[in-house]
Amino acid sequence: MSAEPSLAATLAELGQPGYRHRQVTEAKRAGAEGFDEVSTLPATLRAQLSERLPFWSMTPEREAVSADGTRKWLLRAPDGVAVELVLIAHAAGRRTACLSSQAGCALACRFCATGAMGPGRDLSSDEIVDQALLATRAAAEAAARLTNVVFMGMGEPLQNLDAVLPAVRAIHAPEGLGLSARKIAVSTVGWVPGITRMSAEEVPARLAISLHAADDDTRSELMPINLRYPIANLLAECRRYCDTTGRRVFIEYLLLDRVNDAPADARRLATLLRDGRFHVNLIEYNPTAGPYRASPPERREAFQRALARSGIEASLRRSRGADVAAACGQLATGGSG
Ligand code: SAH
């Protein structure tokens, strides 16, 4: 956990009512830069909070802007830990924030720059919500609106659900950021115990699985987590999640040239997903230090056609922000980031 006490715990310790937390959140959204600027709080409380904890749990240290309008910040916590936050620009003034949940990742997916960093500490719920608040403000400054939040930055959110679930609830709550559950996505390598927990608790978000292969040999090669939770176990847990929550599951499939992008892979994938409530997103590979290449357009289209013939419609997610290493899988701090 973060070295700092949480805002909620500090307010509780000071004997404050629950709505104080909301007042601080509202002030952060509206542009306040310190507790002394939260005019809805009594003056003594402003002073007490300023003494006890920083107003922002993480602060921007560096910014990079892509030619496509995507922005990336390096954020640092008072204990020195750093993560990256990405704001993706879409048409019509819409923005998607890509949040980090851990300052590194223990799961070592071979195609991912965060995986190459190794494990880092779990972020606290304040640190996650502050990323969303900073993104809201950055969007507003550009006369745009934060419409979507995805947990696709650094880390494995399902290994930090104690902080991610309260953060999702705060981002969803009308008195928080007020995003609907359809506009929040939590993405996982397939950490099965986390999926079980997401089935058991009402979580206002979509669940996305980074599947990336349709057979265990290929998947284990790409994602060592597959040795622990092979595809059949993972998809069985996803079906349970669909049954208990009534929600669909989003399957992410990264297209890697001659690794997982043959028409036969598409047919295998369609067989795996038969009878399920799944939606497939194909993802363009963004270069990292790993040994892979993106599928060329003709292989990608052939894969998509083979999927469609097997009854699965898939959308293609285009790469954004790759020129400043802000795209999926490129986030890292310290080394290449
Ligand atoms: N740990 C979570 C969330 C972070 S990654 C997860 O794995 O789902 C968010 C998405 O980016 C995942 O689907 C991940 O597999 C994908 N990704 C990782 N490296 C990538 C790369 N080099 N190019 C494109 N997508 C990548």
Image: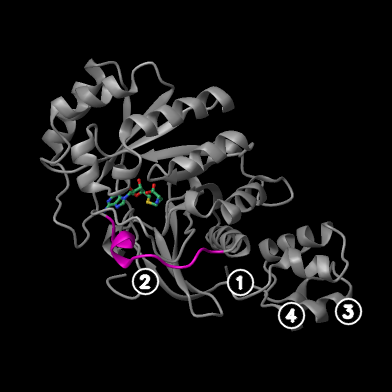
The location of residue 80, given as percent across then percent down, is: 49, 80
The amino acid marked with disc number 2 is: Thr
The amino acid marked with disc number 3 is: Thr
Magenta residues (range): 112-123
Q: Residues within 10 Å of mark 1 (few under 14, many from 20)?
A: many
Q: Residues within 10 Å of mark 4 (few under 14, many from 20)?
A: few
Q: Is residue 151 magenta?
A: no
**Answer yes or no: do the residues labelled 1 and 3 have beta carbons within 8 Å?**
no
* Residue to which mark 3 is pinned: 44
**Answer yes or no: do the residues labelled 2 and 3 have beta carbons within 8 Å?**
no
Indicate the quadrant containing the N terminus: top left, top right, bottom left or bottom right: bottom right
Q: Is residue 81 above or below residue 98?
A: below
Residue shown at 89% from the left, 73% from the top: 42
**Is 171 left or right of 264, judged from the image as shown?**
right
**How far is disc 1 from disc 3 in space, using C-alphas?**
21 Å
* Residue to which mark 2 is pinned: 333
**Is 36 left or right of 301, judged from the image as shown?**
right
**Answer yes or no: do the residues labelled 2 and 1 have beta carbons within 8 Å?**
no
